[in-house]
Image (tube, helix red, strand yellow):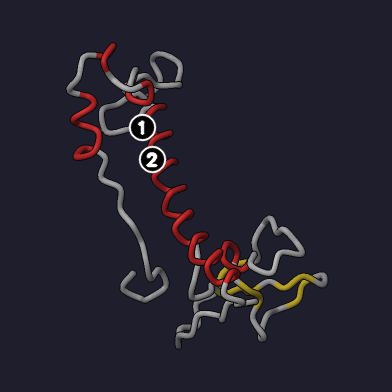
Amino acid sequence: IDDGVILDPFLLVTDPATTPFLDLAESSRPSGFQKWRKFGAPPNTPGPMAHHPAVKEHEWIAWMIALHFLSVLEIIAADIASGVTSIAPLRNNRSDSLPKPVTLIRGNEFENVLFGYPTNTSVKIGGDTQVWKMTNKKC
């Protein structure tokens, strides 16, 4: 963060949002908050500890992250609707680079929001671009 590589990190603190639901009796809770501390790990394994999220908390965190991504996708949808056809690369003086994404969906002009873009000075190994950067709108 201090180096400017991650420009918009977010932190999820679950207690303020979950406590009102977890204070209810189990049968009165919404289904997503029932069996909140049930772990998917087998008994007597080191996973089930108070500081480790259980299955339902992992699911809840995933939904919060998905909503974060959705907000970026809404901006992109507005860009498409207004005629924007590409996203400018992030401009900064840093030389930090990303590796080539493991999975790419070819043919989508906005895939660089999720994966970044190959740099002009990229190293080609076996015909594949190996150095990538992020855009100014990203997930």
Q: Nearer the viewer, residue 36 or 52?
A: 36
Instruction: Give the residue displayed 60% in from the left and 64% down from the top.
Output: 115
Residue 104: x and y, percent? Answer: 70, 59
The residue at 66%/85% (across/down) is 121
Identify which residue, 127 or 61, lies in the foreground: 61
Placement of 13 over or under 5, stated as above or below:
above
Amino acid type of the residue tagged 2 in the rendering: Ile
Res 114 quadrant in image: bottom right
Considering only vertical position in the picture, is 58 above or below 97? Answer: above
Residue receiving disc 2? 61
Tell me where residue 29 sits by quadrant.
Answer: top left
Q: Name the mark on residue 57.
A: 1
Q: Amino acid at mark 1?
A: Glu
Spatial CA span between label 2 and label 1: 6 Å
Question: Which corner quadrant of the image does residue 108 belong to?
Answer: bottom right
Badge 2 element:
helix
In the rendered image, residue 60, in percent from the top left (x then y), is placed at: 38, 36
Q: Position of residue 30 (x, y in %)?
A: 33, 22
Answer left or right for 65 relative to 50.
right
User: Residue shown at 18%/30% (left/top)?
Assistant: 20
Q: Which residue does the image show at 76% across and 64% down from the upper left?
A: 107
- Between 13 and 41, which is closer to the camera in this rendering? 13
Say whether residue 114 is left or right of residue 123. Answer: left
Q: Do the residues under discs 2 and 1 have CB atoms within 8 angstroms?
A: yes
- Residue 86 bears which disc, if any? none
Residue that protrudes farthest toward the bottom in the picture: 93
